[in-house]
Amino acid sequence: MMRTLTVELGERSYPIHIGAGLLERGELWRPRLRGRQVMVVTNEVVGPLCLDRLRPALQGLQVETVVLPDGEATKTLDTVAGIVDRLMAARFARDCALVALGGGVVGDITGFAAAIYQRGVDFVQVPTTLLAQVDSSVGGKTGVNHPLGKNMIGAFHQPRAVIADIATLDTLPDRELRAGIAEVVKYGLIRDAEFFAWLEARMDDLLAREREATAEAVERSCRNKAEVVAADEREAGQRALLNLGHTFGHAIETGLGYGVWLHGEAVAAGMCMAARLSERLGWLPAAERVRIESLVERAGLPTAPPPELGPERLLELMAVDKKVQRGRLRLVLLRAIGAAVVTADFDPAALRAELAAGAAAA
């Protein structure tokens, strides 16, 4: 059974379709495109698994395909320039469309290329990892990394549709599945305590890829994100809550080198660091911090930063964060499970103590 949500953005509203066997169903997204030229961007892992399934949806169109290397190291301006080169060489017009077939890296790169080609063309997200289905494919954040900071170059550019085919998760490596679960847990922590309790009850089913539980987790995650994006598309306020764990996590990814830890792994550790800091500040009850760390551990994810990144290095990297304003670092912290805040009003000594303790624990 297919589930459909809508990201409500007026004339730019778009559907999120969730279900098994959706790749072949071009009727879900083709009517939303303006022209007949389509470029599919995928990678060397997803392409052999999914391109043939997508082809029926592309019949009658002028199709170009770009196959990228796999991994976070691909997420660069040079890769985007290569996609633009292909668009230009094929003489793709302003009514063309790009299709992002892959995980979050492919989606971010493709969306950014669509945002800048001829000042913005259509694109469709076809996410094939759990992390992309519940997070990066929804909301219009696109971009690439810089050696000094993750996702520092990009644009807001909303897709025309999101096609989340949960059958693509059948071939997802266990490590990638667990990384995606980190972003699912995030929604429970920031605004949906009932969902967090559901995850405590159904975590084993998610790890076992049980279809009904997976569809429910994807739908509830997307519903939470769609509501936040509709209220704050360009992160002027509450959308920043979606970055719980990300300031810590991005520092880990940048410090280790992109791709050493998966994004979801770094975010998982970052969420636990935020929870422990919240407890240090007297905001989060110890019992709730224990629930958070327990659920993250059950998902097979790290709860502490890697030991090779000490407190000073983490602080240095965290200073290069999009939430820094007027020289002050803002963090997403927890008042309770389901109640997050964005704040610069915390004791810097408590942050340093948490970074030191986290490094020691690792």
Image: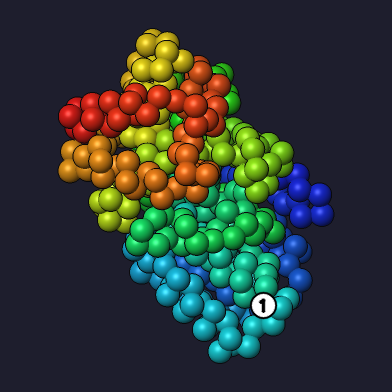
Return the residue nearer the eye: 343 or 206: 343
Q: Residue type at mark 1?
A: Gln
Q: Residue 98 appears at what percent x and percent y?
A: 60, 70
Q: Residue 337 appears at what percent x and percent y?
A: 50, 19
Let me know if residue 337 appears in the view: yes
For this view, does 264 lie left or right of residue 216?
left
Element class at badge 1 = helix
10 Å neighbourhood of mark 1: few (<14), some, or many (≥20)? Answer: some
Q: Quadrant of residue 306?
A: top left
Q: Residue at x 36, y 17 (%)?
A: 280
Q: Is residue 94 above or below residue 190?
A: below
Q: Is residue 42 above or below residue 9?
A: below
Quadrant (top left, top right, bottom left, bottom right) of the N terminus: top right
For this view, does 299 lie left or right of residue 211?
left
Return the residue nearer the eye: 39 or 207: 39
Return the residue nearer the eye: 100 or 146: 146
- The residue singled out by tag 1 in the image is 118
Quadrant (top left, top right, bottom left, bottom right) of the C terminus: top left
- The scheme the figure's colours follow is rainbow
Q: Residue at x 41, y 71 (%)?
A: 68
Q: Residue at x 51, y 69 (%)?
A: 41
Q: Residue 106 appears at what percent x and percent y?
A: 47, 62
Q: Residue 215 appears at what percent x and percent y?
A: 55, 37
For this view, does 92 lie left or right of residue 213?
right
Q: Residue at x 37, y 44 (%)?
A: 318
Q: Is residue 39 above or below residue 11?
A: below
Residue situated furthest front in the rendering: 326
